[in-house]
Image: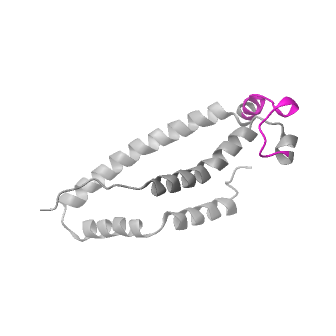
Amino acid sequence: MNENKPVKHGALWTVLFAVVSLFWIFPIVLVLINSFKQKAYISKNAFSLPAGKAFVGFENYVRGVETTQFFASFGWTLLITVGSVILILVCTSMCAWWIVRVNNWAAKLLYTLFLFNMIVPFQMVMFTLSKIADMLKLNTP
């Protein structure tokens, strides 16, 4: 029998993954650092730490929360998300129960349609949906 032996990775792999993770995290850190600067200093010295006149503290965050009605938007998002997840769970559970227990052409067709939905890429659906929203002027400014 083959026993599962622990795989030994060399230091080279550790260094490689550390470098890749730095490239992954760097843009996030850069945005975080620049969020504490005034707008003019972001374009001049994007890679420098905020100091002196460039440092604005949490002023950008406070202004962003006030101008975008962040907490109201967060509340609506939470309500819609929780409500839709509950509705999706109830509807899909009932549909799955029906598909498993009823053996006719409609159940087989519905099962096949559900399988077909897994084949179509999500981006294809979202592109069409966003295009329709733009044509109907349902996009936000």
Residue 129 percent across, percent down from the top left = 58, 62
Asked if the magenta segment contains residue 55, the reply would be yes
Q: Quadrant of residue 66?
A: top right
On screen, residue 45 above or below 67: below
Residue at 50% across / 54% down in the picture?
Answer: 17
On screen, residue 105 above or below 34: below
- Left or right: where 9 falls relative to 49: left
Residue 23 percent across, percent down from the top left = 61, 53
Magenta span of residues = 45-64
Asked if the magenta segment contains residue 7, the reply would be no
- Left or right: where 20 falls relative to 35: left
**What quarter of the picture does the N terminus occupy?**
bottom left
Residue at 54% across / 64% down in the picture?
Answer: 123
Residue lying furthest front in this view? 11
Residue 9 percent across, percent down from the top left = 38, 55
Residue at 45% across / 44% down in the picture?
Answer: 84
- Left or right: where 26 falls relative to 97: right
Q: Quadrant of residue 76?
A: top right
Q: Nearer the viewer, residue 19 or 44?
A: 19
- Left or right: where 29 falls relative to 5: right
